[in-house]
Image: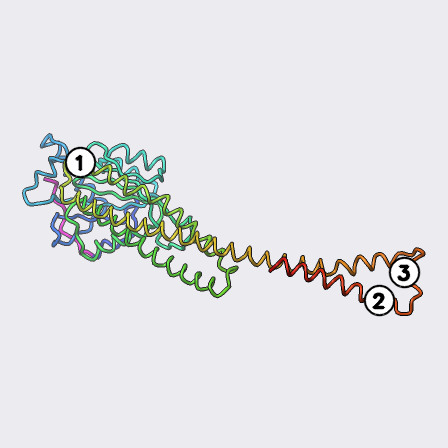
Amino acid sequence: MPSPLPPPAPLAAAAHGADAAGLICGYLFDGEASSPPRPLDLDEAALWLQGVADTRSDTGTHAGAVARAEPDGAPPYAWLHFNLSHAQAQRWLERHAGLPDSFYEALREGTHSTRIERDDDALVAVINDLHFDFGFEPSDIATLWIGVGPRLVVTARTRPLRSVDDLRLAVRTGEAPRSTTELLERLMRTQADVLVGVVRTVTGRIDAIEDALLARRPDAQRAKLGELRRVLVRLQRLLAPEPAALFRLLQRPPAWMAEADAQGLRDASEEFSVVLRDMHGLQERVKLLQEEIAASVQEDNNRSLFVLTVVTVLALPINILAGLFGMNVGGIPLAENPHGFWHLVAIVATFTAVAAWLAFRKKK
């Protein structure tokens, strides 16, 4: 069994900030949903991980066997959440966590493409999440790197992320997933809940833009629609591979993953897929509104062009006659006629009326 830890500290101690090695929070779970987790600092986490490593070496078995060796349900496990902005964070993980090399390679390379895969007897995941202060900008999306084993869950990020912070708050208030897989499931469900909130907010904004469009005020809404569509497209592109990657993983789960936990991940994946479908529907709705606004603007442009054309046509007779009668040459008609001016006015009026009739007839 892992080495004993010091007496439990009050649960509120988990609210500390990141320490010298970038540990934002650490929790130890005893595998019982009714037992609240206890906070861990770096020294306690290192002691716990050393105990797990000693247990593996003493039994001479792999991690899955160690996990199944616990007689009373799920084994105890730890969750460590790191801020990778600290230079020591990755070195501490490499020294103590015992995660597969692919996890550290993903950290070093800064991989952002979504994936969830199995490496030997551990899971390595790279998912994208919203910034804590998400402002509906395409740049307000960052990456969370996750390593999952039977006794340890490590999450690491460079910027505060909303889903993992919501999960941290839930755990701090006493929520205790029974296993590492259930913790991963809770994270995915939290991520889906955050996206549901985004979908609702975007839906409200689109409804307001649609009302403005119906009120014939399209110009002020075109930029807003463009921003919303860019955000939705980026979210869809970054998050869409996640359910498919999880589905492929669950075709061949690790030995230590219980069937109930695997089913929970499938259910979470289905919820996530539903949210992604809602986001796709919003993209189509935004696209239709943009097309409607473009058609309305085009109609206004056509109307303005028609008015300009009619004015040009109506001014054509008087311009032609004024040019002809303004030439300083001999033989200008009606020059000696006392009523010549009014004759010219009648001629211009007649040609203008004929041109207007032809123009409006074509419009009709």
Q: Which residue is mark 1?
A: 254
Q: Earlier in the sequence, mark 1 or mark 3?
A: 1
Outermost residue, top side: 60
The CA distance from mark 2 to mark 1 is 101 Å
Q: Amino acid at mark 3?
A: Pro
Q: Main secondary structure of the magenta part?
A: loop
Say what secondary structure mark 1 lies in: loop
Which image quarter: residue 238?
A: top left
Horizontally, residue 330 falls left or right of residue 150, namely right
Between marks 2 and 1 in the image, the one whose residue lies nearer the viewer: 2
Say what secondary structure mark 2 lies in: helix
Looking at this view, is 201 or 287 the one in front?
A: 287
Q: Earlier in the sequence, mark 2 or mark 1?
A: 1
Q: Which residue is mark 2?
A: 343
Which image quarter: residue 154?
A: top left
Q: Is residue 61 magenta?
A: no
Q: Which residue is mark 3?
A: 333
The CA distance from mark 1 to mark 3 is 104 Å
User: Is 60 drawn above or below residue 234 in the view shown?
Assistant: above
Quarter holding the C terminus? bottom right
Place of residue 353 in the rendered image (x, y in percent of width and height, measured from the top left): 72, 64
